[in-house]
Image (tube, rainbow, N blue to C red):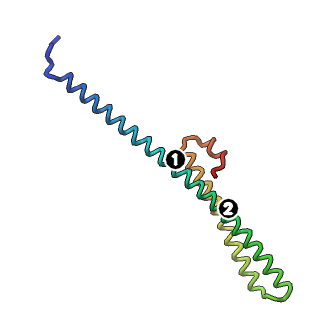
Amino acid sequence: MPIFDGLRSDADRRAALSRQRSQELRLHSLELQITSELRLARQDAASRNAQITVAEKNLRLSEEELRLAQQRYRQGVADNREIVEAQNRLAIASDNYVEAVYQYNLSRVELARAKGDVRTVLTEKVE
């Protein structure tokens, strides 16, 4: 067994330490990326949930607007154009509500993906 290996063992040790440090940096980078994705997914889900609330209020307002337009028409104060316009606004508000719910559910799926636990995340409501 040779006593002097031309400093090969020291070079091998330094190369192994370098590979270890490289892997540690990759792991740290990955942890930061996952944390960032999770935070953004939570914020997106909360924002989308707030959009549902706004869409619900807009939908109720459109329903009330249609009711009032129909009432004015029955009393002879307005023509049917006002009813048609109110119905159009109600349809748009309904579409917006459906879209808000859809986007919220998509954001919950993204949150589940970022969290890594689909079953748990899909049963909870993000506020």
Q: In which image quadrant can residue 99 be found?
A: bottom right
- Are the residues flagged by discs 2 and 1 in contact, CB closer than 8 Å? no
Relative to 86, is 47 above or below? Answer: above
Which of these two is toward me, 94 or 77? 77
Mark 1 or mark 2, which is nearer the start of the sequence? 1
Q: Position of residue 73 (x, y in %)?
A: 82, 85
Mark 1 residue crowding within 10 angstroms, few (<14) / some (14–19) / many (20+): some
Which residue has dot 2 on it? 53
Relative to 28, is 37 above or below? Answer: below
Q: Amino acid at mark 1?
A: Leu
Query: Taking 93 as reference, is 79 left or right?
Result: right
Q: Quadrant of the N terminus?
A: top left
Query: Taking 5 as reference, is 60 left or right?
Result: right
Q: Position of residue 81 (x, y in %)?
A: 74, 86
Q: In which image quadrant can residue 93 be found?
A: bottom right
Query: Who's the residue at 76% across and 81% down the image?
Result: 83
Q: Amino acid at mark 2?
A: Thr
Residue reaching furthest to the right? 75
Q: How far apart in space, not on screen, are marks 2 and 1 (Cα)?
A: 23 Å
The kind of secondary structure element at disc 1 is: helix
Q: In which image quadrant can residue 65 be found?
A: bottom right
Relative to 61, is 69 above or below? Answer: below
The kind of secondary structure element at disc 2 is: helix
Query: Who's the residue at 47% across and 44% down the image?
Result: 34
Image mark for residue 38: 1
Q: Position of residue 80 (x, y in %)?
A: 78, 85
Q: Position of residue 38 (x, y in %)?
A: 52, 47
Mark 2 residue crowding within 10 angstroms, few (<14) / some (14–19) / many (20+): some
